């Protein structure tokens, strides 16, 4: 169980943050600034004057959430094996669930200093990232760890 959570959480988190950094870079945002945006969920506006320390906190927060989402899926799939029976369907469903919970629940309840806005292109790319780069490794790691049913 621990190995699956570490593997799926690390791989999903890595692919997700690399996508986010690449997408942000295309819009002129450097990696440190992106990680400060992530840290602003915990630190509020102060994250933007916190330099590399705030960026490191953002990276730690990102991976902590990644491991948490991996653990949640693993526990759910262990109790309901059908959740991981179809990897693409599971990744699509879980990716959408994670995306919308983060955007509509976690960000508004955090110290994130900006309103959550809707941009179809950005949201579309982020949803695809959550499905293929974040959730698919989580589903894969879960399926590898759980006995076949």
Image (tube, grey):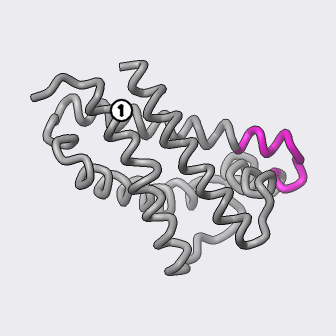
Secondary structure predominantly adopted by residues drawn in magenta:
helix
Q: Where does residue 30 sit, x and y in percent of width and height?
A: 80, 59
Q: Quadrant of residue 24?
A: bottom right
Q: Where does residue 65 sit, x and y in percent of width and height?
A: 53, 40
Against 83, residue 19 (above or below) is: below
Q: Where does residue 136 sit, x and y in percent of width and height?
A: 37, 47
Pointer 1 local density, CA inside 10 Å: few below 14, some 14–19, many at least 20: many
Q: Residue furthest left?
A: 149
Name the quadrant of the N terminus: top left
Name the quadrant of the C terminus: top left
In this rendering, position of residue 131 left or right of residue 102: left
In magenta segment, residue 42: no
Report the residue marked by disc 1: 141
Q: Secondary structure at mark 1?
A: helix
Q: Residue at point 48% right, 26% down?
A: 6
Q: Where does residue 148 sit, x and y in percent of width and height?
A: 14, 27
In this rendering, position of residue 95 left or right of residue 65: left
Give whichever of 29, 110 is nearer the camera: 29
In magenta segment, residue 51: yes
**Residue segment shown in magenta:** 47-58
């Amino acid at each position: 169980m621990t190995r699956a959570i570490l593997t799926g959480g690390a791989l999903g988190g890595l692919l997700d943050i690399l996508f986010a950094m690449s997408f942000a870079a295309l819009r002129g945002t450097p990696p440190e600034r992106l990680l400060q945006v992530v840290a602003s969920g915990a630190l509020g506006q102060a994250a933007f004057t916190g330099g590399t320390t705030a960026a490191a906190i953002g990276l730690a927060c990102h991976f902590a959430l990644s491991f948490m989402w991996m653990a949640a899926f693993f526990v759910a799939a262990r109790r309901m094996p059908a959740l991981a029976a179809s990897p693409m369907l599971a990744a699509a469903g879980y990716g959408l669930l994670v995306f919308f919970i983060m955007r509509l629940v976690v960000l508004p309840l955090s110290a994130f200093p900006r309103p959550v806005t809707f941009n179809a292109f950005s949201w579309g790319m982020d949803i695809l990232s959550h499905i293929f780069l974040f959730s698919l490794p989580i589903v894969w790691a879960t399926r590898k760890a759980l006995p076949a049913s």
